[in-house]
Image (tube, rainbow, N blue to C red):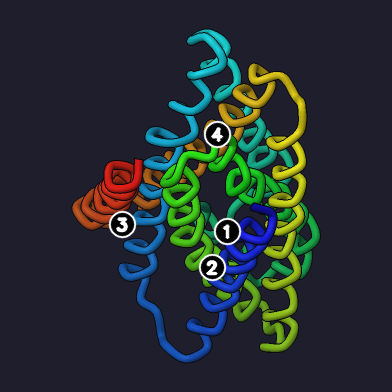
Amino acid sequence: MLTEILIKSSAAVASAVFGAVFLFSIKLSHNKLCALISFSAGALLGAAAFTLLPESAQSINLLELVLGAATGYLLFYFISKYFSHVCPACSASHFDETTTKKFSEIVLTLLVALSIHSLLDGMALASGGAEHIQGENDSVFIAIMAHKFPEGLALAALMIGSNYTRKKILLSVAGVEAVTIVGAVLGQFIFQSNIPPAIMGAVMAHIAGGFVYLAVHAVFGEMIKSHKYLVITSFTAGILLILLVSFLFS
């Protein structure tokens, strides 16, 4: 099981790095980036709604489920509001030209915030297999893979705008996204130990709340700046993909 988790978390990191490499070879329009971000946001929401929250509900009651999800949502909210945007892809519309030019001044805080995000991504990969149900981990894995690509792409775009070298960009993206692997190992330990089911359910609800925040923040941020039809269509496609995966493999 650990080997599988390591492979999937490494693949998620590779997806982010590929996103950065992809940016070097193609000129990406805002509409295409918007579609990618919205699609990945839908996938994250789908993973929360169809995998993490239902799994949590098997071991905790409705009130505990809501409170657990609220802690995950509020964690990312407060980090984004008072520290740094926790996800460069979800916050793409918030990084204006002036902010991009000053990226070197915010790079540390952004990378720390993104590391927290990546840690929980890794734990989510491990949590999908908590009950050893085939398909649970698959839907979370696909959602995270879909999200990592525009995440790496957006981080690379910020660094390019601040005149970082390609080598430094790739090392930075790979380094911060590698925390996903750390989170996966930590999550594997937590979910395979003798921790009470209620605690595991609360952890999964917490992770789901973070996913909901990222999805909502990304979609509404892009809807304000871009075409609503494109955002809604891409977002819905992401949700339907995870729903299909959950239906096929559950």
Q: If you read the primary sequence from the N terminus, does the residue marked by circle 1 or circle 3 appear first?
A: 1
In contact (CB < 8 Å): disc 4 and disc 3 = no
Camera-side mark, 4 or 3: 4
Camera-side mark, 1 or 3: 1
Residue bearing mark 2: 154
Marks 2/4: CA–CA distance: 34 Å
Residue bearing mark 4: 131
Q: Quadrant of the C terminus?
A: top left
Marks 4/1: CA–CA distance: 32 Å
Q: If you read the primary sequence from the N terminus, does the residue marked by circle 2 or circle 4 appear first?
A: 4
**Tag 4: residue type?**
Glu
x and y percentages locating residue 224 in the rendered image: 34, 47
Q: If you read the primary sequence from the N terminus, does the residue marked by circle 4 or circle 1 appear first?
A: 1
x and y percentages locating residue 161 in the rendered image: 60, 78
Q: Which mark is residue 88?
A: 1
Q: Residues within 10 Å of mark 1 (few under 14, many from 20)?
A: many
**Tag 3: residue type?**
Ser
